[in-house]
Image (cartoon, rainbow, N blue to C red):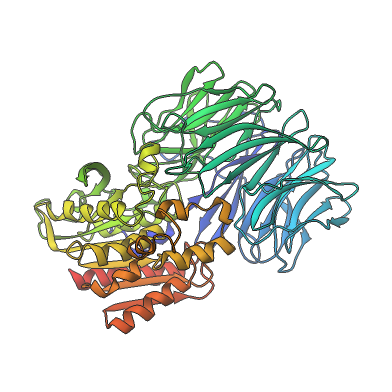
Amino acid sequence: MSRIPTLSDVLDVEYPGPPSWSPNGDFLAATLYEDDGNVLLVFAFDTHLDVTDADTDARPHTEPTWRFAPEEGHVSEFAWSTTTAELLVATDAGDLLLADPEARTTRRLLSGLEDREAYTWSNDGTRFAFYRDGRPVVRDVATGDERAYDVPERGPFLGESRMFAWADDDALLAYRFVDDDATQVGVVDVESGELVWRTRSEMASHSPTWLADGRVVVDQRGEGGEVRRIVAADPEEDDETILVREVDRERGVVSQGAPEVSPDGSRIALALSLDGWEHVHVVDAETGECTQLTEGTFEDKGVADATPRWSDDETLVFSSNRRDPGQRQLFSVALDGDVAPLVEAPGTNVHPRPSPDGDPLAYLHADRERSPELRVDADGNTRRLTLSAVEEWATSPVEPERIEFESTGRCIEGYLLDPRESDTIDATASDLPAVVCVHGGPMRQMRDGWHPSRSYGLFYTFHQYLATKGYVALFVNYRGGIGYGREFRQAIAGARGKDEIADVAQAGEYLKDLDYVDRESVAVWGLSYGGYATLQVLGTHLDAFSLGINLAGLADLELYRDWAEETKYPPAASAEVLRMGGEPWEVPERWAEASPVTHMDAYEVPLYNFHGTGDRYVNFEQLDLVVETLTDLGKEFDADHYPDENHVFSKRATWKRTLRKVERALEVER
């Protein structure tokens, strides 16, 4: 290539999902997002991983044994058999396939646009459980015989990573359902169909798993986000034991990530911030003793909902930013607390997945020069399974500079892209336009280089493209995000819409103080909470930005809360009241002040808006409210809605149109 990157190059970058090993370690699978959805990649490692000449600065890599793209639609989920190298592959077109990667064949098991999800194999590999139209169903793989259970249904709330769990002997099946406006966990006798045990707590219960002694483990959160418990229950005796309890009445519990049971079923592992920082903890299921294995002023967690993974009964693997707040490397820790490095490559290394025998180790990697890649390490060598398309660009990516500034008495960090460091912009250029990019969440974090997720990775790729056109970028890690300790995550409790918005505004001021930036051309944009921050900052810090771009942001927090507690998460687990300092009728001024719609009459700069009608994370009515309010106020704005599009747009054409409009809007305001 002799040209600079184009918008098509931005959209050509592919994003792999977390890897997953077959039960014997002969195959590794992962989704790869390309264009409008996921394909499935399968790699064969029949005997040992070939890592010869696997220099990560070169391009040697292992080609996938099978790149499976469905005839219709895209891969929506997959699950390896627990006993053989077969896997269930579901598509968004309604097919469920049994795939054989060795033969590279598929057999259709189910079809049609029924609402089906959460396919989970039994331990003996003969059956699998799933939801059909909200009801739990068990299907025999060989015969196709099915049984739907007449028990409480799944309910409307978003799913978790683990919705079903089979007991060791496959006689009992734990599953998540909704009752009394809360997620609950029940245990079904697979043979009789009887619901033999269920939670009845007012707390939200989810993510069941089993211990070797026959008890089911449940993750619970309640009392308005103030309490989290990990409970072990004996379905026969109806007896419960609290293994872990976190309580924070003032700011709420912020630890996330479902507990993981050790291979021998005697312990659970999870990340907790009991000492103020996310660290690896192990609980002895018999004694209830909780042991903190790692410690320090850093976070032993790769992404917000990550959990340490067992490589054997005495060793866990995890991701940590102990070497740099904006990076992640991989480590192991033994039960005696001995920590050892596993992957020391600079950048972000997350989603570690040890093979069934503990070696090799698969994970996702991204850094300053590469968009996310799927990698495998063995014996100290690295094999790149997917390759970053960015390496084909004619211009090298601009290396981010870690910066910091003060905002209302707190040090805030971010990452700056200076286009003068690119091959296309003069090193002495001045009066350059700039953009503050605001992540969502808020419990997220921008990284030192590409982010491992598609949502923020795509934003970062687009800013690398904009850098070739002279745009400065600042990715701000504002209060409420991960990576900087519990107190930082809790900093917006009771003051939502104020301090974190000041951080965003101050990021704009930081850019204006750079002698090569045009002070009159500093824009702000973001997705989800980043969209909310954009809407809020334009009405509360009037001189901060010259343009705002909102993707799926919140305009009215009470409107969002009412919708979310009916469709997204149960009221018991909601921390909205805690974040706001009270109910809307108790502190109406706080809810009003934290809602951008209150401040839209003060808008002085143009605003562009984009939202999908199929969004399951932010209700589309938020865009309706923005349009209605700004129309009535006679403000300058533009709004696009995309029928059936998701929170993070799924279609290449949608992103192409959106990013073209964003680029044109930035050009107009230069």
Apparent side of residue 558 relative to residue 508 in the rendered image (left or right): right
Apparent side of residue 269 relative to residue 346 in the rendered image (left or right): right
What residue is shown at x 64% (from left), y 63% (from top)? 92
What residue is shown at x 64% (from left), y 58% (from top)? 181
Residue 414 percent coordinates (x, y): 27, 45
Q: Is residue 352 visible?
A: no
User: Looking at the rendering, which quadrant does residue 584 occupy?
Assistant: bottom left
Residue 477 percent coordinates (x, y): 32, 47
Front position in the image: 438 or 197:
197
Q: Residue furthest front?
A: 586
Residue 295 percent coordinates (x, y): 43, 24
- Reply above or below: 631 against 535: below
Q: Is residue 370 visible?
A: yes
Apparent side of residue 502 relative to residue 393 in the rendered image (left or right): left
Front position in the image: 440 or 102:
440
- Reply above or below: 94 against 139: below
Image quarter of the N terminus: bottom left
Residue 615 percent coordinates (x, y): 51, 66
What residue is shown at x 50% (from left), y 58% (from top)? 34
Image quarter of the C terminus: bottom left
- Reply above or below: 227 against 95: above
What residue is shown at x 32% (from left), y 66% (from top)? 535
Number of numbered discs on residues: 0
Front position in the image: 436 or 100:
436
User: Looking at the rendering, which quadrant does residue 541 occupy?
Assistant: bottom left
